[in-house]
Amino acid sequence: MSHKPVEYTEYLQLDKILNAQSLESDKAGAHAHDEMLFIIIHQAYELWFKQVHFEVDSALQVMGKPEVNDNSPELQTVVHRLDRVVTILKVLVHQIDILETMTPLDFHEFRDFLRPASGFQSWQFKMLEAKLGLKFDNRYGKEYYTSMLKPQYVDLVKDVESQKSLLEMLDDWLARMPFFSDDNLWKSYQPASQNDSTHHVFWNDYLNAYSKTLVEGEQHNKEIFASIFLGEGKSEHTSLSNKAMRNALFISLYRGYPLMHLPFQLMQHLLDIDEQMATWRFRHINMVHRMIGSRVGTGGSSGKEYLQGALNKHYIFKDFAVLSSFLIQRNKLPHLSSELNHKLGFM
Ligand code: HEM
């Protein structure tokens, strides 16, 4: 196979990248030294956002399939790539350290030249939120969305919003898991308590064991448990269906079984993604406060107040964090049937 020799500068198209920093302060004849850092740091963010999209897109491709084998190389790849996303996000959090070497006064030397540009116009960031599962209706400060983004970028984000998000795919994937839809898996199960309810024998036992752990102020958790995990619909407390939540809790409880490893890791990575994005938002808010105090953003939002609202509201995979409220001690877990032991990989 003939292969044209590649040269480093050409391969990386450095002539484009290294010539893509033009300082607004220079154009105004008022050179501000720190504007170079400001541009480069934003460009570095956008490049990493591109990589994150690349990884998330490949995860969507697998998770969107009607059948995903839960012990397959495909799922392994999704878990591996989402782990990479988490690692990138950690770097993105730390990049703030570099920008914070700029003092507020240094920033004020060029800030006015940037108006009305703002990080809010990062359509890659908005698209990422949407791809992961943030719907327009759940956005904090929806009014800024169309007023601050150019119409072509609004269209891009809307297009992603109209497609199935990773969260929706997870809902389907978790709901499809066969743990409670196949009675054959429970043939030899020994119930620990009498079942006078319509719940599956396992959940009847689990709810009994869980109820015993509740202190006085937590008694209402029983009703919340029922609304989130039992029945066939979807609770007002979660985005995921009851079926999906049941299976997610089951995976968390029995994650030691070989077949549960990958699904459990996947859920952990999603929680990590939420945590890193929230950590980034938190660090960004502190930086904003440090740089501009309580002044409005260059994009025209209320600044710190808007960002705090987005931080509080834009957790995407919070349903997985909800599971922790409903765990019990490992030694109190119901013993699974031999059929399930076999299916999950221990026999
Ligand atoms: C001196 C440093 C910075 C300041 C003072 C600042 C300020 C702000 C403010 C006030 C907003 C709210 C929207 C507005 O009214 O403009 C915002 C949003 C945003 N900024 Fe920054 N920013 C800084 C650095 C960065 C960096 C380095 C990034 C990296 C990409 C970034 C990304 C974003 C994003 C993605 C949003 C939208 C967040 C959301 O909608 O939840 N910002 N920024």
Image (cartoon, rainbow, N blue to C red):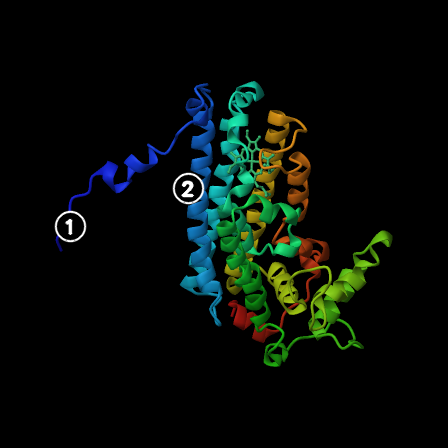
The residue under label 1 is which amino acid type? His
Earlier-in-chain disc, 2 versus 1: 1
Could you give the CA–CA distance between mark 2 and mark 1, rounded to whole angstroms? 28 Å
- Asked which secondary structure carries label 2, the reply is helix
Q: In the drawing, does residue 270 fall left or right of residue 41?
A: right
Residue at point 54%, 23% (across, down): 107
Q: Position of residue 231 (x, y in %)?
A: 72, 72
| Residue corresponding to mark 2 | 47
| Residue corresponding to mark 1 | 3
Q: Position of residue 306 (x, y in %)?
A: 66, 40
* Front-most of residues 195 and 241: 241
Quarter of the rendering containing residue 104: top right
Residue at point 51%, 24% (across, down): 110
Q: In the drawing, does residue 149 fall left or right of residue 303?
A: left
Q: In the drawing, does residue 9 fall left or right of residue 317?
A: left
Q: Position of residue 1 (x, y in %)?
A: 13, 55
Q: Position of residue 129 (x, y in %)?
A: 55, 51
